[in-house]
Amino acid sequence: MSDVHETPKPEPSSTAIEWIMPVLFILVFGWVTWNGANYIITLPGEEATHAALIRRYGTPDILDWIALILSPLIFAAGVATVRRAPMEWEDFSVPDRVSVFIGRIAMMLIAILVGVMFYEVILRYAFEKPTLWANEMSLWLAIFIFLLAGLYAMQQRSHIRIYLLYDVCPRWLQRVFDVISTALIVLFAFMLFWGGYGEASAKFLRWETFGTAFDPPLPATMKPMVLIVVALVALQAIFNLVRDWNNEPVIHTAADDIDEDELRRLRESVGQTETKDS
């Protein structure tokens, strides 16, 4: 383990570009995801399966290939431009940037999910013309948000932990606990990947859909996505263990949940109100 804990440099304030990049990535990668069957037919596989996919979805066109090429480029640009907010975890190396940018994607997906639900409510109750796609789209987005938010929570060390025993232990024993918890996370990820890879691969290669009127490829996309995100969570847990190894012990109290910046703004607001009243 490294003996040096780097102090992160102050990050510039939030800019528009770091919110534009997640939206661009969602648009481009959304195209890739929706048209995933077009890419599968170019992979080695059963001719009967490919023939069925071609009959239903056709073959990839120039827009499909442009979106596929742009996806990793936009993702890399997003990782490079993302900035740490004041309340976020202080470490901000390249792996942290990846997780934080994925967290930004999850944040934008929440806004899109709210928009889809609002659109459905208006059409259903104001115009009595409900859509055939909003329910499945909401479910699809919610699954993505749940998975991506889990990785962000691991990077932020904001997952649920019980510190009652941990805080009273000496630092060397805390490190033992950290190693055990990380090992369990890695073991869980390995077992899940080992047991789920075959099914996820089969559903992806035959581009299994949901079987509804909208018929989105939920099984084909979600099964592999679960494995990918769990593997990333395990890698982030290992990275957290290395980064936090030489940190000083932290005593956790109820004050940890207080946002000092928000508290300061509330005090200023109260002070201004009292001045006006007087």
Image (cartoon, rainbow, N blue to C red):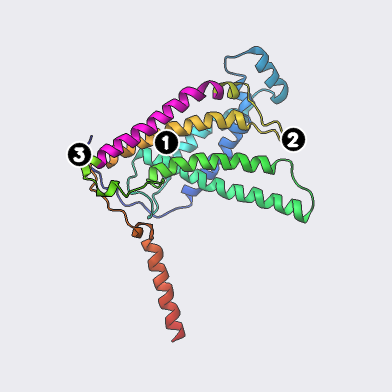
Q: What residue type is labelled 3?
A: Asp
Specify few, some or many for label 1: CA neighbours under 10 Å numbering under 14, 14-19, or 20 or more. Answer: many
Q: Is residue 83 left or right of residue 248?
A: right
**What residue do we see at 36% from left, 62% from top?**
260
Label 3–label 1 contact, CB within 8 A? no
**What residue do we see at 46% from left, 22% from top?**
194
In the rendered view of the protein, which quadrant contains the C terminus? bottom left
**What residue do we see at 56% from left, 39% from top?**
143
Give the camera-side residue of 194 and 41: 194
Closer to the chain start, of discs 2 and 3, is 3
Residue 144 image position (x, y, % from top left): 55, 39
Q: Which amino acid does label 1 sit on?
A: Val
Q: Is residue 209 above or below residue 148?
A: above
Q: Is residue 200 left or right of residue 261?
A: right
| Magenta stretch bounds | 174-200
Q: What label sits on residue 233 in the rendered view?
A: 1
Give the camera-side residue of 129 and 180: 180
Of all residues shown, which one is farthest toward the bottom? 278
